[in-house]
Amino acid sequence: MSQPPHQGSSTAPVRKPWAALAALCIGFFMIMLDTTIVNVAIPAMIKGLNASLTEIIWINSVYLLTYAVPLLLTGRLGDRFGPKRLFLGGLVVFTVASAACGLAGQASTLIIARAIQGLGAAAMTPQTMAFITRLFPPSKRGGPMGLWGAVAGVATITGPLLGGVLVQTLGWEWIFFVNVPIGIVGIVMAVILVPDWQPRNSHRFDPIGIALSSVGLFCVVFGLQEGQRYDWGAIAGPITVFEIIGFGVVLLVAFVVWQRVNRREPLLPLGVFSHRNFSMANLANITVGFTMAGMFLPVVIYIQSVLGYSAILSGLITAPLSFASGIVAPFAGRLSDRISGKWIVAFGIAAFAAGIWAFTLVAKYDSPGWTLSPAFLLAGVGVGCIFSPLANLATTGLDPRLIGTGSGIFNTSRQVGSVIGSAAIGVLLQARLAVELPAQAATAAQRVPAPYREQFAHSFDQAAGSTDFSAAANAPLPAGIPPGAAHQIRLLGQSVFEHAFTSAMKTALVLPILVLVLGVIACLLMNRRTPLTGTHAEATPAGATSHRS
């Protein structure tokens, strides 16, 4: 055996694996919560920090970016130095950074604190899945993966609801402060309940691979995120947006080539993709991450700025998604122990896409909020069927020495999808608004008094080229306009914004639906069963059978 015997843990984790998992899930809950909780606070943060929409988008995107980039490395570090140590270190960093986020007085400070928060999250996430594969044998992982999936799904979707309550009652700062007491509880529980398992795999590190993957991913995401701001032209001197994106793609291709020719120990062992289920699970994972991160920005702005609901009510409207996901996930995890998980995940992704499609059919500029909830309920049933069976499909059958690396790759794929989805759907939304705003304004201008028609239409032409979408609806009017005419113009301006944004949002949401279709195809290409030969004995610590009874 190339893997040394189990060290550093007592028999406690064998007797109480669920207690250890519960401690790990507290940290994982905070990580996933913070991928979406910021979205509902966007209007409050723009006002409180005097920030632009681009800065606010970066507050969320920088977290996703610094979370995604180091995951391959932190999975490797957990294999070498012990997953408990990496998990605890990441949890401390995450908790301290959360306090710094709440104390930030300007957007730039908050962006830096969010970047540090993402690094803490990256240290924790691969260790959770690594522990599941250590504490539970393959035939009994459906339940633990169900809990893990429930935590991931509920936390991601609960963000808008919890964020709405905190923003409206205590202020936007509390979407970060709430992590501090939870983090402290998680640290204490992890110290007491989580075993200090030491895989002691003598991994080499791959500095060239780390540099290529990190810089390449950053360039691609930066280009997508900032393209609209620079009108897809020059950023600094002769350097253009497309050159930045192209440079990032070249670096990522170079990264893959380097992983293939690196004869020592690559950061991303390409051989792991010889497992069809692992490869297809990661592809499906990208599509889910793309959708979950990308859909919330337009949906939250629509519910609050178009329909006019408060932060709390907007959270309640989307709450069926969280509720259904939390109810379904544990059952989906246990069901994956009995039938092939590929069918469960394929159904879940299809239901998720169907829920989004139903939302686009119902959403109008004046829709009552309750009419949207059934669509979110259907999407939530889908999300509940995805996380735990998909993680089980990805990790079962891997060489035990590659569990940490495999977990890192799996979590990286979801976060890469999240970063690209957040940027891509934001770009598509802005592009559609650039078309819809002038078109709606030209129609509405016919009802504006003749002396003010040109100015009315021009204000929306200007807004179409900026990231302040609703500026034209609230633009100051010249002095001397009769109060009746001014009121009419303002109402028409708001109507133009509402119609234009609703139409642009519905078009933008077609993209994640199409991406999810790719996820369904990936599931259907999986093997019916994952081979378990050799995995059970090696992946399960001595005496672990005692928790089967």
Image (cartoon, rainbow, N blue to C red):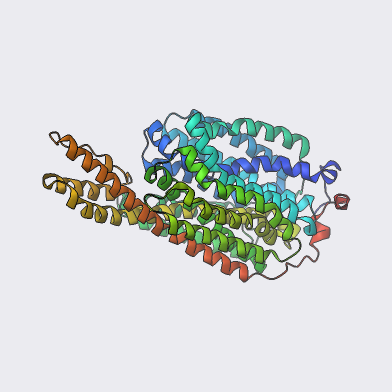
Residue drawn at (85%, 53%) of the image = 548
Vertical arrangement, residue 311 with respect to residue 280, above or below: above
Residue drawn at (70%, 70%) of the image = 528
**Left or right: where 504 falls relative to 20:** left
In this rendered view, identify the residue nearer to me: 533 or 70: 533
Q: Position of residue 406 (x, y in %)?
A: 66, 57
Q: Position of residue 328 (x, y in %)?
A: 66, 53
Q: Position of residue 191 (x, y in %)?
A: 74, 35
Question: For the image shown, how many numbered marks are present on the structure?
Answer: 0
User: Which quadrant of the figure has residue 527?
Assistant: bottom right
**Left or right: where 482 falls relative to 339:** left
Which residue is farthest left? 451
**Left or right: where 549 falls relative to 404:** right
Vertical arrangement, residue 490 with respect to residue 502, above or below: above
Vertical arrangement, residue 314 with respect to residue 216, above or below: above
Task: Give the quarter of the figure containing the N terminus.
Answer: bottom right
In this rendered view, identify the residue nearer to me: 334 or 138: 334
Q: Position of residue 149 (x, y in %)?
A: 66, 51
**Left or right: where 264 falls relative to 295:** right
Residue drawn at (68%, 62%) of the image = 393
- Evaluate whether residue 258 shows in this view: no
- Evaluate whether residue 42 shows in this view: yes
In this rendered view, identify the residue nearer to me: 321 or 111: 321
User: Which quadrant of the figure has residue 32?
Assistant: top right
Residue drawn at (54%, 42%) of the image = 159
